[in-house]
Image (cartoon, grey):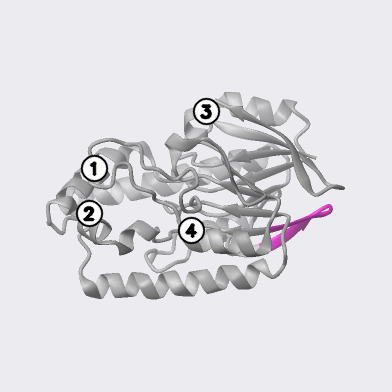
Amino acid sequence: MKILAIGDFHGKFPEKLKNIAKGKDIDLILSTGDYAGIDDFRPYLRKSFKAREKGKNVWLEDIVGKKKYRQLLKKDYSAGKIILKELDKLGIKTFSVFGNGDWYRCFYNKTNRDYILFIKKLKFVKDINRSKAIFKNLKIVGFGGYLDPDIYFTKKGKKAIFDNERVSKKRKKRYSEEGKILMRLMKYKPNILLIHYTPYKCLDTLGEKGYMLTGSNMGVSFYNKAIEKYKPSLVVCGHMHENQGKCKIGNTLVINTGAAGEGKAALIDFDEEKGKVEKVRFIR
């Protein structure tokens, strides 16, 4: 079976990747999400992060201004829908989870804009966010969306994101609940785990310079616990654009696809009968 592992589009789907999907006899596409999260936001996000590191509680709306912020949100939502449509046009079965920047029902999305409802209208793209699926002989669990990485619970992490004890307590509760949800799903004993964030200390080092957390591990350790206990053959993740590549947790192969918006992805040959990865080729 040939699998195209892809994600972190951020409003861009290079023709190079579309052509590879059409011309490589791809059986299945696994997408780690982040269809939205357009580049227009990035300069303002950097300013927001820098302000928080200095102890200022500054949000994007404060920096951008209400009118422009609303315009950017609308553009962001539309850009993600365009990517999902383009994925669907490929005519290849696609299982998807959401990234931290996507529009889906969660604690921070209080609007009527929702990719969950949009994906239901598509023919080939299926949302398996925090759910499970089967394709031929493969069992797959999907677990994406926004997560609080472990670093946020350290003294350094709390300072970097300007967390007070009340907010930190909420994060801890959410982290615990999400870890339990994943463990329940993993009882399905999947061959493949499809996630957005990286596991802890596995392709998760923040490489972007100039931040308090630069060089820190930004992964999520309850992923590691689930992988170590249930031992899927393959884990597909993204989020950390700078860390395209592979690593191992026990005998489980973990692949970071790299950012599709930068023309990156991974081609995986998976032996259904043996239940293991035969070959991986990274598209750079």
Q: What residue type is labelled 4?
A: Gly
**Disc 2 on helix, strand or loop?**
helix
Amino acid identity at mark 2 = Ala
Q: In this view, does 224 lie to the left or right of 242?
A: right
Residue 99 on image: x %, y %: 48, 52
Q: Measure the C-alpha gap from mark 2 to mark 3.
A: 31 Å
Which mark is first along the chain, 3 or 1? 1
Which residue is pictured at 38% across the width and 60% down the height? 150
| Amino acid under disc 1 | Tyr
Q: In this view, does 225 lie above or below 265?
A: below
The CA distance from mark 4 to mark 3 is 22 Å
Q: What stretch is highlighted in magenta?
A: 132-140
Spatial distance from mark 1 to mark 3, Cα to Cα?
26 Å
Q: Which amino acid does label 3 sit on?
A: Gly
Q: Name the residue under label 1.
A: 211
Mark 1 secondary-structure assignment: loop
